[in-house]
Image (tube, grey):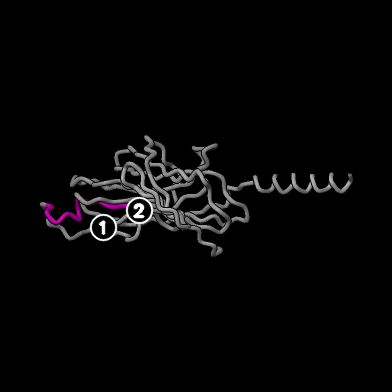
């Protein structure tokens, strides 16, 4: 009887441990970036009229799996208006695993606008408190336009490695996560979720 009670207690402890998650060890890549092919190619000088994605790599550096989390991209147009775009990772992330979060933004106009792109990670239970942020990326598509009236060769595209956690603004939740394990799904807005786990430690 005593042995049965000991086994039950051990099983309960194992179940409790399996339920433990830790989001505090989630980290981002160094700098957020823009891609024109779903998160493969880093485009340093975005142009008007082309389709682009916002991209960041996320790693769980801890010993426990993470719980669900949100990767929130923020696009500042220089006027004080910041639009936010969420990629939700409901499955969490295994210990030492990495994922690539990708949000399909679409096209930039040919207006002369200095954009700043930022990204942070949040827990659903604390959506205003950033867990980690990447460096920002500044760019002006108008300066990279081939038909720009100025004809200037001053292509704008700069990165800032000091992360920002101020991504307040309107939120759009249609994004995708690319969690390097092998499941490839497509969402209705054309963005895809390609999950893959990377067991290499930080």
Quarter of the view holding residue 88 = top left
Q: Which residue is mark 1?
A: 45
Instruction: Give the secondary structure at mark 1.
Output: loop
What residue is drawn where x is 65% and y is 46%? Answer: 20
Residue 132 % position (x, y)? 50, 49
Q: Which residue is mark 2?
A: 137
**Residue 48 belongs to magenta span:** no
What residue is drawn where x is 75% and y is 47%? Answer: 11
Q: Quadrant of the N terminus?
A: top right
Neighbourhood count class around disc 1 (C-alpha, 10 Å): few under 14, some 14–19, many 20 upward: some
Considering depth in this image, is 123 or 160 the residue closer to the camera?
A: 123
Considering depth in this image, is 156 or 55 the residue closer to the camera?
A: 55
Whether residue 84 can be seen here: yes
Residue 52 % position (x, y)? 28, 51
Query: Which residue is outermost to the bottom?
Result: 200
Query: Which residue is outermost to the top?
Result: 170
Q: In this image, 134 relative to 114: left or right?
A: right
Q: In this image, 104 relative to 112: left or right?
A: right
Q: In this image, 7 relative to 118: left or right?
A: right
Among numbered discs 1 and 2, the one appearing first in the sequence: 1
Is the residue under label 2 in contact with that under label 1 (CB below 8 Å)?
A: no
Residue 76 % position (x, y)? 33, 43
Considering depth in this image, is 162 or 173 the residue closer to the camera?
A: 173
Magenta-colored span: 137-148
Considering depth in this image, is 164 or 195 the residue closer to the camera?
A: 195
């Amino acid at each position: 009887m005593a042995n049965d009670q000991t086994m039950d207690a051990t099983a309960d402890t194992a179940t409790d441990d399996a339920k433990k998650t830790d989001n505090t060890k989630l980290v981002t890549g160094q700098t957020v970036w823009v891609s024109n092919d779903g998160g493969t190619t880093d485009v340093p000088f975005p142009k008007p009229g082309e389709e682009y994605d916002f991209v960041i790599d996320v790693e769980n550096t801890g010993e426990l799996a993470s719980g669900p989390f949100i990767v929130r991209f923020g696009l500042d147009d220089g006027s004080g208006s910041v639009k936010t775009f969420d990629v939700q990772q409901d499955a969490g992330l295994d210990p030492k695993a990495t994922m690539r979060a990708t949000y399909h933004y679409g096209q930039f106009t040919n207006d002369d606008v200095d954009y700043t792109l930022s990204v942070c990670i949040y827990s659903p239970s604390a959506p205003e408190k950033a867990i980690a942020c990447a460096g920002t990326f500044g760019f002006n598509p108008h300066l990279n336009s081939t038909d720009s009236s100025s004809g200037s060769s001053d292509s704008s595209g700069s990165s800032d490695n000091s992360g920002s956690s101020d991504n307040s603004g309107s939120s759009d939740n249609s994004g995708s996560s690319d969690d390097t394990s092998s499941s490839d799904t497509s969402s209705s807005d054309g963005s895809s979720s390609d999950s893959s786990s990377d067991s290499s430690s930080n």
